[in-house]
Image (cartoon, coloured by chain):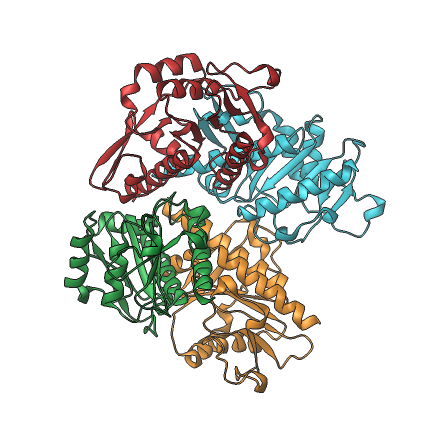
Chain colours: A green, B red, C orange, D cyan
Amino acid sequence: MKSEMIKEQLAQTIRDYHKKGWSPATSTNYSFRMPDNLDVVIVSRSGVDKSQFGAHDFIDVDLNGKTRPAFEGIKPSAETLIHCTLYKLFPEMQCILHSHSVYSVLHSAVNSDWVDLEGYEVLKGYEGINTHDTSVQVPIFDNTQDMLEFSEVLINQKERLTVPAFIMRKHGTYAWGRDLFEAKRHLETTEYLLEVEWKLRSK
Amino acid sequence: MKSEMIKEQLAQTIRDYHKKGWSPATSTNYSFRMPDNLDVVIVSRSGVDKSQFGAHDFIDVDLNGKTRPAFEGIKPSAETLIHCTLYKLFPEMQCILHSHSVYSVLHSAVNSDWVDLEGYEVLKGYEGINTHDTSVQVPIFDNTQDMLEFSEVLINQKERLTVPAFIMRKHGTYAWGRDLFEAKRHLETTEYLLEVEWKLRSK
Amino acid sequence: MKSEMIKEQLAQTIRDYHKKGWSPATSTNYSFRMPDNLDVVIVSRSGVDKSQFGAHDFIDVDLNGKTRPAFEGIKPSAETLIHCTLYKLFPEMQCILHSHSVYSVLHSAVNSDWVDLEGYEVLKGYEGINTHDTSVQVPIFDNTQDMLEFSEVLINQKERLTVPAFIMRKHGTYAWGRDLFEAKRHLETTEYLLEVEWKLRSK
Amino acid sequence: MKSEMIKEQLAQTIRDYHKKGWSPATSTNYSFRMPDNLDVVIVSRSGVDKSQFGAHDFIDVDLNGKTRPAFEGIKPSAETLIHCTLYKLFPEMQCILHSHSVYSVLHSAVNSDWVDLEGYEVLKGYEGINTHDTSVQVPIFDNTQDMLEFSEVLINQKERLTVPAFIMRKHGTYAWGRDLFEAKRHLETTEYLLEVEWKLRSK
């Protein structure tokens, strides 16, 4: 079945990203909005060691982040509401990835509002960018444990989301796409550029 | 049998951590306090290449670090007494992990008593911490080859162990938990934060 | 068949280099000029996730970069013309590799025309160099999206190509050889030396 | 047969070290002095991609580095004479490993005669060292392509070889032991300490 294949592929991506060091221990969370029922979002459940994350470790929530009946009693990731808010802001998106990468955290510890990335060939990894001769700003939002508050910040500052990725301060990166393939491209593009830019500024 | 499964899982963790570079050659040691007999601690035996560590490379000791009869003649790790002392100080803990990670050694070479870690989302990896808006101090103890002396330091300075991890100077990190899952989360949380903090301070 | 074996081996190399972080997401491109028909170049097709690149993901182009009839409608990499130009400049070469390695990008962000590499044993990885007691200059060319323009730059500045590798600014490294084995040696030699040299200059 | 097992284990080590980045492309070389015939040394043959090195890629030489009859016509590594000289200087040793690690090269680019390593727990990885409370000097010798000359330097300066490892300037590390297990411990100990020390001095 298609939904099983999506879960298998996303679980594989989660294990691969753990190997890169992007999700120490049980951290980070991931989701997919199901193509056959747009009211259903599968989201990684809380507290699973990401080195062993499997297709059965997703649970179904609705677009408000409420656990669907079949999964009652299982805790979704605390940040589920961020995923739901992004799906509402960008209805064409179907996959959201998250990382706690070291370079994302480092930039947000020393920059206040955004990271400027300019003139890199790999900028073309962002959908719609066709030349290196441009610059983007990856926005940084303050971290919070209040997901309702953070959702409102995203809604009110939607105009800052000019690339399909943002950084939560001293927390990590969110990136999204119309499918897993595009979401991966956007996350890997962002993490690569943040690494290069950090090493360049640290010289 | 349950004890065999514990040994298999811990041996797998040991091989995985070797790949991360946390245990060059034969270094570091690991233990588990057996749930079906709390007087028995399994501890990694001395001198095994950690890239090839297997379930059969553990030996049984009692809570004072004395090799149990069935394993007489096999040398437990020199640091067995540290494990035993920690199990006595924290009776609810059942697993202790150790690493010689580069960043742990680096911090302890330039800081005297502790490493401050503040405002990171991943701090929530420590049991009992529910917000990034806090700070912890990972204590640093001077290294020694006298394990009796070091055990007394741990006992006398127990109040410094405010997180389930500490650093031995120019040696590495110890971390523990109520099971392998929690001990891994505490070690990986500590190592991740030490890496970020070192790179931030080196900018 | 020989051509199938070449595709399998090159696809394996592509997946291995992705693991090294040299091709975030779908980036970079690779080619081979077929020994049994020198008018045919196989080149990686556009938009494939390099972690999953397979032998079937190559398409055939002619020496001017035009897709051959059997593959019409499939998009070759945008940089195909660079490959074709290099095969014309160096007719004895049969394999061209590309990377977006972090250190290549970093050097080209701070140096204007070339990177000097001097006195390293690994310089012997370049064909024809038999001693560490020498120096080479890896040339840097400005990046562009205009492949015709870039091909002319390569043709007009052929004398700068004194080693079988060059850097495109804030983009990455190209390297080539008479077969896959030699092309790999030239790319790995270049990337290793660029890493060492960057870390040395950053001390 | 025992000699086959030795070749298999050494070939596995060679492939593992390639993955660590210690032998870009075809670089570095390795040897073992056969326990059943001390006049025979097996040494890695020249020009093999170390990612694919197999048990059949060793050739037999005598203690003067001369290829033995059965292997005539196959080129041993250019540095075979270094291995032979070390076996003569330290007759109890049976295995020699080599790396081109980045940190070894970096130290030797900025230090003239040795690297001081002091107070690290992992110093105990060197045979005969039982405490962190000591220091060692890893000697640096100038690189040369004249292996006869280099052998004489080793013989004349044998007193500088106070640990079972040395650095060739801007080239890499040699380490040895009484068997593969000990040689690995000595190389991994050295590389780990060189990495820590470089990062400490670069802060």
- Quarter containing the C terminus of chain D: top left
Drawn side of residue A166 relative to residue C4, left or right: left
Provide residue B29's location: percent of width, then percent of height. 49, 27
Q: Residue at x 69, y 34 (%)?
A: D85
Drawn side of residue A104 relative to residue C126, left or right: left
Q: How many marks?
A: 0
Q: Residue at x 59, y 55 (%)?
A: C125
User: Does residue A130 show up?
Assistant: yes
Residue A158 lies in quadrant = bottom left
Above/below status of A116 relative to A15: below
Camera-side residue of B179 and D122 = B179
Q: Residue at x 23, y 41 (%)?
A: B131
- Quarter containing the N terminus of chain D: top right
Camera-side residue of A147 and A24 = A147
Provide residue D103's location: percent of width, then percent of height. 47, 41
Above/below status of A77 relative to B180: below
Drawn side of residue C14 relative to residue D14, left or right: left
Provide residue D193's location: percent of width, then percent of height. 47, 33
Drawn side of residue B130 relative to residue D183, left or right: left
Provide residue D133's location: percent of width, then percent of height. 44, 19
Point out the residue furthest to the right here. D69
User: Does residue D148 show up?
Assistant: no
Above/below status of A186 relative to B59: below
Camera-side residue of A67 and C41 = A67
Above/below status of D130 relative to B124: above
